[in-house]
Amino acid sequence: MKLYTSSFALMAALSATPGFAHDVKADDHAPIGVMADHTHEKGEAMFSVRYMHMGMSDNQIGTDSADLNTIVTTIPNRFFGVPMQPPTLRIVPTEMNTDMVMVGAMYAPTDWVTLTAMGSYVTKEMSHVTYQGGMGTNQLGTFETSPEGFGDISVGALFPVLKNGDRTSKIRHEMTVGALLSIPTGSITETAQILTPMNAEPTVRVPYMMQIGSGTWDIKPSATFKGWAGKFGYGLQYAGTIRTGANDEGYSFGDVHEGSAWVSYNAKQWISVSARTRVRTTGRVDGIDPMIMGPVQTANPDYQGGERIDVLGGINLVATHGPLAGHRLGLEIGAPIYQNLNGPQMAGDWSLNVGWQKAF
């Protein structure tokens, strides 16, 4: 709420002042949901704070919806045969929310490289329905799990490989490539109390998607192309997450490959709006954590990942004068238009990114 209030206050102040004292534009940066999109000149530094929310609800198998009763009567339990494990799934997630606060810093020791680092604090909440016994559709009750903690830390470098024109040019282009490393500082041994089909309430290790970190050293390459023509801007980005091996618990998350394309309109120097399409593929979990077990889809490594296309709309604001000069605020909100999931799996619902940036 404070970020939204600041946005409206900034717009009012800018609208009331006819002069501009700083050579910055709102669309100099990509939409706030796109990271690693720019570099800095020698000696410059930038700090940022982002808040990200991701919501999930309902379930899908491939591109088709799957209701709870179908899942608990037809989907086999991978762990059937282990004592107290029923033949089909008996616990189904119904909703998940992930909230993340990310703090980042960038510094350019030379014109040809910008160093970057980012850390995060992650909060996750998942709601479940538990069904009675080993068969049937009688619901026993509901429960929630809510792990939270500091996530993995990313460090690396961004390199400007193309800069054609400057802010005074009617047409200009730039391209940035990035090489980041994700350090496994987030926990992968989070636990929570659950409700079992036998009406017990043990404390167990939460499934893969509810852990805070990846547990692996991950390589994160990126390449971003941006262009401007008059009041219009456009961009393309590829960003990946490549796992380098199994973590200490015996598994690794699937690789992620993501592509974005966007257009923006710089209505005034201090405000721009954007539309973006994002395509993402995520692999299944490779390996298995022997401590993650149960008649729930999230405990099965095969029921992870898939394909997804999102559309997002955004707004970028930048102060061009006074005590707030150079401060940037961005907001982007979106939802999926296509999902093909390795299910049964909860489907994405909507996402929100709000962020502040300031270069020095």
Image: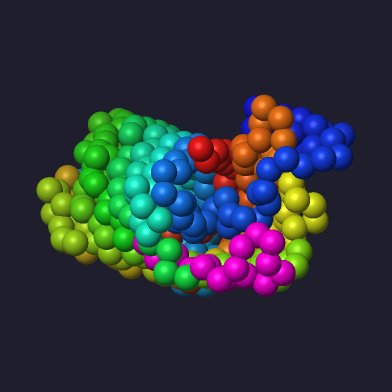
| Residue 196 vertical position relative to residue 220 in the rendered view, above or below | above
**Image location of residue 99, percent across then percent down:** 48, 39
Q: Is residue 319 left or right of residue 145?
A: right
Which quarter of the figure has residue 281? bottom left
Where residue 264 appears, as percent x and y from the top left, is 70, 62
- Name the residue at 66% across, 56% down: 27
Would residue 22 be found to the left or right of residue 76 on screen?
Answer: right
Q: Please, is residue 100 above or below residue 278 in the view?
A: above
- Across and down, in percent, residue 227 comes to 61, 69
Q: Which part of the image, by quadrant, shows the N terminus?
A: top right
Quarter-wise, where is residue 87 in the image? bottom left
Residues drawn in magenta = 163-178
Residue at the image point whose x is 72% and y is 35% from the top: 321
Look at the image and tell me whether residue 280 can be seen.
no
| Number of residue marks | 0
| Residue 90 in the figure: left or right of residue 204 | right
Residue ID at (74%, 46%): 270
Q: Position of residue 53 (x, y in %)?
A: 53, 43
Given residues 219 and 25, the one toward you in this image is 25
Q: Can residue 245 be spotted in the picture?
A: yes
The image's colouring method is rainbow
Q: Nearer the viewer, residue 257 or 269?
A: 269
Was residue 234 drawn as part of the magenta stretch in this picture? no
Q: Is residue 321 above or below residue 29?
A: above
Does the magenta stretch mainly form a helix, a strand or a loop? Answer: strand
Q: Residue at x 62, y 37 (%)?
A: 327
